[in-house]
Amino acid sequence: MMLTGDIVKFSWRNALVLTIASLISAAGFVWPFFYTGESLPRTQIFFWVAISIAVLLAIIEISGSGLDSKSIALLGVLSALIAALRPLGAGAIGIEPMWFLLILSARVFGPSFGFLLGLISVFVSALLTGGLGPWLGYQMFAAAWIGLLAGLLPGAKSLRGKGEIAMLIVFGAVASELFGILMDLQFWPWALGSQTQLSFVAGAPISENLSNFFTFHFLTAMAWDIPRAVFTAGLILFAGHAVLTALRRTYVRAAFLTPIEFIEHEKVQREV
């Protein structure tokens, strides 16, 4: 099985491993809403290790799924570009130009390519900026999920023009907010202690912790998420068509996944 428009060959085994890895990483984000203990757990390292294992599992499995040399080269180039774009805004008030290129690349080259691109580009960026830490696994999977979802948007082969740009603008804004929510989830239980009205309450009903979290999120992170959404949507609006055209031209000219055939010299001479 290969996902439509995807230059990464994606088998049922890939899909299974990716699903397992995503579920493991998702547990690292949403565990506060299902934790039934009476006190704040001090085993955060378990979730960091689980996320790291999930990242390695996904990279190893997808990387061994038949990527040809052209796909690997493209993945490397785009990962380097995204990694270079990420520090330009230094995360200041959410200005992060990397997201628009990740979204557009996943749109053209497919969901599994987008997933892998999100993982690798954030990891490379962390190496360049010294951003290594327990948060890295969360950032990598958040970016990977955004790449995956961008590649799964409808009309990959048929939708073009203003309609496609409008859809990508909306997705860019939603993805920017989603990234902010995921990043808040990974540190919220320990961010405020246990003495505020916005704190994580161990063993409390899901509804209570959800209310506390989203109140915390909108009060503390909207100064980052709204600028990120506006900036990403603006880049897609003004540069989306040109970038999509260039990426699609690359897709066609590179003839990804087309077998390379070598013709014997003597056979060519006879035909001539």
Image (cartoon, grey):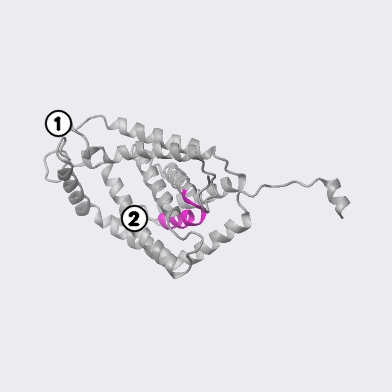
Label 2: state its secondary structure.
helix
Picture layout, residue 33 above or below residue 43: below
Residue that protrudes farthest toward the bottom in the picture: 162
Camera-nearest residue between 39 and 153: 153
Q: Amino acid at mark 1?
A: Glu
> Which residue is rendered at x = 57% and y = 47% of the image?
71
The answer to whether residue 104 is magenta is yes
> Badge 1: how crowded within 10 Å, few (<14), some, or many (20+)?
few
Direction from residue 10 to residue 171 in the image, left or right:
left
- Percent coordinates x, y for residue 183 in the rendering: 30, 46
Read off the magenta span: 99-111
Q: Front-most of 84 and 183?
A: 183
Q: Earlier in the sequence, mark 1 or mark 2?
A: 1
How far apart are labels 1 and 2 at the CA level?
Answer: 34 Å
Prevalent SS, magenta region:
helix
In the picture provided, is 216 more to the left or to the right than 140?
left
Taking the spot 81% from the left edge, 45% from the top edge, the residue there is 264
Q: Is residue 10 left or right of residue 19?
A: right
| Label 2 environment density (alpha carbons within 10 Å; few <14, some 14–19, many ≥20) | many
Q: Percent x, y for residue 195?
A: 11, 40
Residue corresponding to mark 2:
176
The amino acid type found where label 2 is placed reads Ser
Look at 25% across and 53% down and name the residue there.
Answer: 221
Q: Quadrant of residue 223?
A: bottom left
Q: Residue 31 in the image: x percent, y percent?
A: 26, 37
Q: Quadrant of residue 53?
A: top left
Label disc, if present, on residue 38 of the rendered structure = 1
Is label 1 in a helix, a strand or a loop?
A: loop
